[in-house]
Amino acid sequence: MAEADVIFIGRTDARPREDAAERVHFSVIEVLKGAPARELAIARHPDDDCDRSFQRGELALVFEVKGRMPVCAGNVDLDALMPTLGDYLGGDTAKARPDLDALKLALQGKVRGAKATVYAPALAGTTLQVGSTKVAFVDKPADDRLTAGGVTRGSLTYVALRAPDSVATYFLVGREHGKLAVLQQLRKDLKIR
């Protein structure tokens, strides 16, 4: 992060452009460093072995270093960064308070019954209605309790959930086209095999 001139989370164009061989076009969702415009085109360097390629419509954490987007600078697939994305957004996910609407979206399908208790020290004492389930956040862990953490930066919220069976689900929630939605999600089994 220190070496990059510009860092942002953005989505590449879903439709091809005439200059797609020379440039990657992004819609910037959230700026983490620098001051790029809402739309940004970065030159491709296909002769560079370290240059990152992107799929159409891909959501990416982009590190621009001297007009380039090298893999060596952290431009890797977003799924590889999802477990630690909260760090990039500048927060300690154990202590930060994620946006409650984003957390509610992440918890859908993860809590069941009339009541659920979730370990989230930063939210202890807070309750949230998720579908038909009233969720109470507490600061006491338990082996049978879902753990939640997250951080909000600007228009994005990162949420990390860990189920009692040691399966973690990571979410990046934000607004695209005006509607709050899960922009990226990764499920990862944390059990040692």
Image: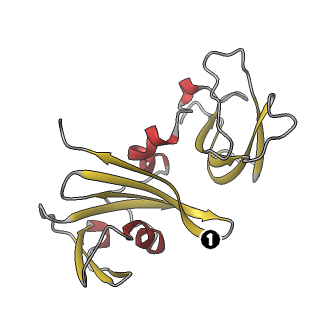
Q: Quadrant of the C terminus?
A: top left
Q: What element carries label 1?
A: strand
Q: Where is residue 137 in the image (x, y as percent from the top left)?
A: 26, 74
What residue is rendered at 33% in x and 46% in y? 188
What residue is rendered at 69% in x and 27% in y? 68
Extreme residue toward the left, this view: 143
In the image shown, does 191 or 128 lie closer to the viewer?
191
Q: In this view, does 52 lie above or below 171?
A: above
Q: How many labels does the image show?
A: 1
In the image shown, does 143 or 85 lie closer to the viewer?
143
Q: In this view, does 118 lie above or below 126?
A: above
Q: Where is residue 14 in the image (x, y as percent from the top left)?
A: 72, 48
85 sits left or right of 168 in the view: right
Q: Kindly tell me whether residue 79 is visible in this rendering.
A: yes
Check disc 1 and report the residue beneath it.
Answer: 179
What residue is rendered at 53% in x and 31% in y? 74
Q: Kindly tell me whether residue 155 is visible in this rendering.
A: no
In the image shown, does 98 or 131 lie closer to the viewer?
131
Q: Dot 1 surroundings within 10 Å: few (below 14), some, or many (20 or more)?
A: few
Q: In which quarter of the image is residue 160?
A: bottom left
122 sits left or right of 75 in the view: left
Q: In this view, does 171 lie above or below 15?
A: below
Q: Position of residue 81 (x, y in %)?
A: 45, 41
What residue is rendered at 18% in x and 38% in y? 192
Q: Where is residue 40 in the image (x, y as percent from the top left)?
A: 77, 44
162 sits left or right of 187 in the view: left
**Amino acid, disc 1:** Lys
